Amino acid sequence: MNPAAEALPGGPISHAIARLARIHQLLAGRLLRDLGLHPSQELLLMRLWESGPQRQADLAAELGTDSAGTTRIVQRLEAAGYVRRKPDPKDRRASLVVSTPAGDALRESVECIWAQLEELTVGDMSPSEQEVALASLLRLEENVLATEEGSRCGLPAARRGGPTVSKRA
């Protein structure tokens, strides 16, 4: 077993996830640096490229961040000329975030960086190992999402005696 995992016997999987997330974000940051982007900025741009103009609240939900964090990302991308905000024609109180031509010009480079990040992340794992890893990660994500928001220690509702939110059969 990995010595780092042994260091936290009460939560070796959670510890491994935290370490992996931190290392993965650092690697992504290094790869994105040449484009002048920081991690999460490319995720916001990728969402705009795939789905078109988006409300900031929808972007926040997609990125898994709060509105303040999303606002900071949008402001930095706007200052760099990669996105702009325009009024939402369906809701005058809201604005839409739109990729600019300069933002669109980054698409190919960002996609290449994400392909490189994927290659570095999976290393020499076989396609079947990658499938198992992805299925495990998705299951872990489902488990975390199934916890009741704001619950003590994030215990699943079923372990506290309440209704479950899980979609598993």
Image: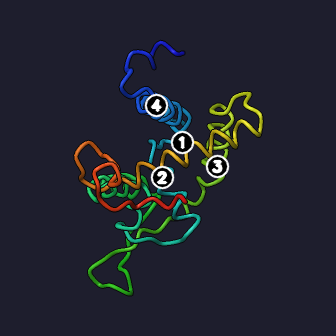
Residue type, label 3: Glu
Q: Give the residue displayed 52% in from the left and 15% down from the top.
A: 2
User: Which of the two discs, 3 and 4, labels the residue nearer the N terminus?
Assistant: 4
Which residue is the extreme one toward the bottom? 90
Along the line of sight, the residue nearer the viewer: 103 or 71 = 71
What colouring method underlies this structural image?
rainbow
User: Which of the two discs, 2 and 1, labels the residue nearer the N terminus?
Assistant: 1
Along the line of sight, the residue nearer the viewer: 82 or 64 = 64
Q: Residues within 10 Å of mark 2 (few under 14, many from 20)?
A: some
Distance of label 3 from label 1 (alpha carbons): 12 Å
Residue 122: x %, y % from top left: 67, 33
Query: Which labelled disc corresponds to residue 142?
Result: 2
Q: Name the residue beneath numbered marker 4.
A: 13
Which residue is the extreme one toward the front? 161
Residue type, label 2: Glu
User: Which of the two discs, 3 and 2, labels the residue nearer the N terminus?
Assistant: 3
Q: Name the residue beneath numbered marker 3.
A: 111
Q: Secondary structure at mark 1?
A: helix
Residue 19: x %, y % from top left: 44, 27
Query: Which labelled disc corresponds to residue 35?
Result: 1
Distance of label 3 from label 4 (alpha carbons): 29 Å
Residue 76: x %, y % from top left: 36, 51
Q: Give the residue displayed 50% in from the left and 50% down from the top.
A: 42
Distance of label 2 from label 1 (alpha carbons): 33 Å
User: Which of the two discs, 3 and 1, labels the residue nearer the N terminus?
Assistant: 1
